[in-house]
Amino acid sequence: MARGCLKLYILLSFPFVSLCQPDSGIVFNYNNTYKFDVEYTVNVSKNVEYIMEFAGDSFDTPARVTVASNFANSTFPLFVTARQQKGVSSWQLPMVVEVPGSFQQFTNISRTLCPHNNMFAEDEETCDVSNQNTPLVHLTSSSPDPIEVTIVVETVKDFYIKLNTTTNITVTPSQPKYYFFPFKQEKEMDLKKQSEKRQSMCSGEEKSVFLENIFESQDSYSWFRQPKSVIVMIESDDDVCAVISIQNFSCPVFDNERNILYDGYYLTMTRRGGITLNQDMFPVGFYIVFIVKTSDEDCTGQNANKTLPTMARYLGWEQSYVATTARTKNFTLRIIATISYQDYLIAAGAALGFFLCFYVAFIITVVYQRRKARQDAEANLNEAECISSPSTPHDAANVSVRRRHTTPINAEAESTSQRCLVGEGDLYRSTRLECSSSSDTESDYSTLDDINREKDLRIMGRLCVANLARCRPRVLQARSKMYLWNVLTVAVFYTLPVIQLVVTYQRLLNQSGNADLCYFNSLCAHPLLALSDFNHVYSNLGYVVLGALFLAAVWRRHDWYQARLRREKELGIPQHFGLLYAMGIALVSEGMLSAAYHVCPNSMNFQFDTSFMYVTSVLCMVKIYQSRHPDINARAHATFGVLALIIFVGLVGVLNANVYFWVAFTILHLTTCLIMTFQIYYLGRFRLDSGVIYRATRELVSRPLAAITPTYVGRCVLLVIANLANWAIAAYGVAQHSRDFASHLLLVLMSNLFLYTLFYIVIKLLHRESIRWYSWVFIVLTYATWFSSSYFYLDQITNWALTPAQSRQSNRPCSLLQLYDAHDIWHFMSSIAMFFSFNMYLTIDDNLMDTPRSEIMVF
């Protein structure tokens, strides 16, 4: 028995004996009397190591270890290991990081140890942690000379973030910090009370009774009226690049640049950042990790020369180390609750109700027009009965009255050449002959082949719509329908891949946690179901709803026009209803594609948001031109071929908008403007071919004064103004040569559409053509809403042409109904502006419905 006890004593004492042997050359200094919040200085070398156990009272917040040494170097670094009951962390001094052109060296490092016994944990397994927060810190080095090391272990103040409170935080690249936000807290969170409940649960004295969830109350309908998420709002007063990570309630917490990507969500920021989080993502709560990056490259996007250090090593140059304590960044953290389902419903219902008011106005207008039409029909019937009730069957006076009421239309049609054309008899006769003998073949699509001859460039008389409306209505209808089928085909085959792509983006965002993938307005991005930014998707509702309403208005007018066409064929301007239907489909498609873009907005899918704006602007220009040139309008396939070229140019500009591209685009832009100017000035009879320079030179030599004197002064002045505006836009684009080329291209198209519309209205008034009062209403509302909405468009809250961190500097909270921001208001107002614009184009020539085409001028 005594012999066995002796063996046990030798075995137990062997480690202590070996530690104290002078032959080992290493002295281990172990002490368990170190206190929190006290700074200690020790000397560490390859022969002296320290094992320091920090003890004290029971702490409910985690420990933070700070180690500093000015004597440790990259050759003989100091190794620090912090060990707890359920985890271990290690790092080394100095911390050397490679930056473009040099290396940065940090001589002090701080780390927060993970709180395994978080007081908000509901899992009883977390109770298996000692009440004494006693971290064990091990200091060791291979340096032959003693290294003076300063170490302090302290408790983290304000570790648990309260709702609607402001927390100030200071962070450096070598001293990251993190805090915890629990979803279960009262308005005034009592941490002492929560700690007592935690201890009671772990001791088994009573069951856990945790604080009430901030999203719960005793009301049975609380789930509907309580907030469902929170917004983490972070601000700073400098441009130092930082990374913010949101991690789940678990250990370890990743708090350096290398491993921060492994868990949760993360984003870069400089002066402002934010993210919206709901309790479904983090049921108990989440950690907010603050890390200052060693360089600003990820935030500024400026690529520094990274080849210099490698080349320097090849040349034998020594690596340069820059010891620095700079890059200190101050943060202000504030977490607020967002809106409830009730607020979602109120804001979404308000937007839907607002757009449904347009339907109510449309229905009232239809009812009023039908009642008025019925009254007019009854009045005409009564007048006809009074006129056509002769006293005798062969009353000569009554016969003459009937003749006067039945012959004017045919008389106008037969006397077109005498009253409309002066000096253009050959042109009119050739056109009339072509259309009178044409069939439904392709020849019907080109009825004015002879008017492009050189002699027609000088117009000596008045050209009327009757001269350019000689094709049969069935031919125009077939040509017009091609616009509808083309835009439907493009919309279907363009929208489906876009939806697939943005769904993939949304899934990638959820899986990777990289919040820099999508350019959200983080301070007003309310998630709902699978959408991270519901409000910006939903606010495109106006495009779809008003587009469908415009289609209904066109369908109603189309039905009325078909009935009228069977009675009167030579009155008013021929309508291309297929083109109008295509405009409505384009408006609906714009809403769908804009909504798809806002699922995950970034530079790679921005063209989805603008593509159908290009389509809409071009279709509106074609509609204006069609009003006075019904037979020589652009073919659908040619129009969409031009649109394909425009979208291709926009794509190239988004991918590679360098200076050379901007110069090439500017030349193309101004050349197109010049060609269109001649087309409009010469009423569509300008022919661009190899002989245009010869003809212009001959006219200038033979008749110099007549060649430079404008025949149509008003038209010339308006076209000069339009060209000056395009030159100004082109100069602005070249001067800025921004990466956001898609917006510049949209500016070019929309500006020319506005100018062309204004040109049409002014020339119409110069020809003494009146405009109906409701058309004036649409004109005023169109320009008022467009200019008002442009303010919200220019008031950018995100900008994909910048880096994500730079874009977040413009983020702002919601400004309308707690759900919508300035860009949502742009969606609302621009959809209304486009709806008013379409109705303006639909009704602007209603005053000419009863006017013979021989009296309607071409311009």
Image (tube, rainbow, N blue to C red):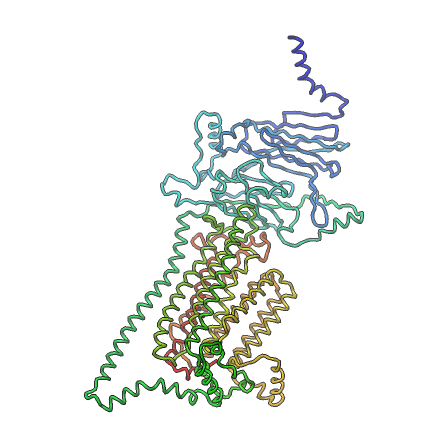
Camera sees residue 338 = yes
Relative height, residue 486 to residue 85 (above, below): below
Q: In the image shown, does 77 or 661 lie closer to the viewer? A: 661
Horizontal side, residue 14 vs residue 454: left or right = right
Please tell me in which quadrant of the rendered image residue 148 appears: top right
Farthest-out residue, top: 1
Farthest-out residue, bottom: 396
* Residue 241 at x, y percent in the picture: 62, 49
Relative height, residue 62 to residue 744 (above, below): above
Q: In the image shown, does 109 or 118 lie closer to the viewer? A: 118
Q: At x 54% / y 82%, what residue is drawn?
A: 452
* Residue 236 at x, y percent in the picture: 58, 48
Q: In the image shown, does 30 or 202 lie closer to the viewer? A: 202
Check the picture and name the quadrant holding the N terminus: top right
* Residue 548 at x, y percent in the picture: 40, 63
Horizontal side, residue 13 vs residue 675: left or right = right
Q: At x 57% / y 76%, what residue is drawn?
A: 675
Camera sees residue 765 = no
Please tell me in which quadrant of the rendered image residue 92 appears: top right
Q: At x 24% / y 90%, what residue is drawn?
A: 397
* Residue 698 at x, y percent in the picture: 62, 87
How many numbered discs, if any? Answer: 0
Relative height, residue 846 to residue 181 (above, below): below
Farthest-out residue, right: 316
Relative height, residue 200 to residue 228 (above, below): above
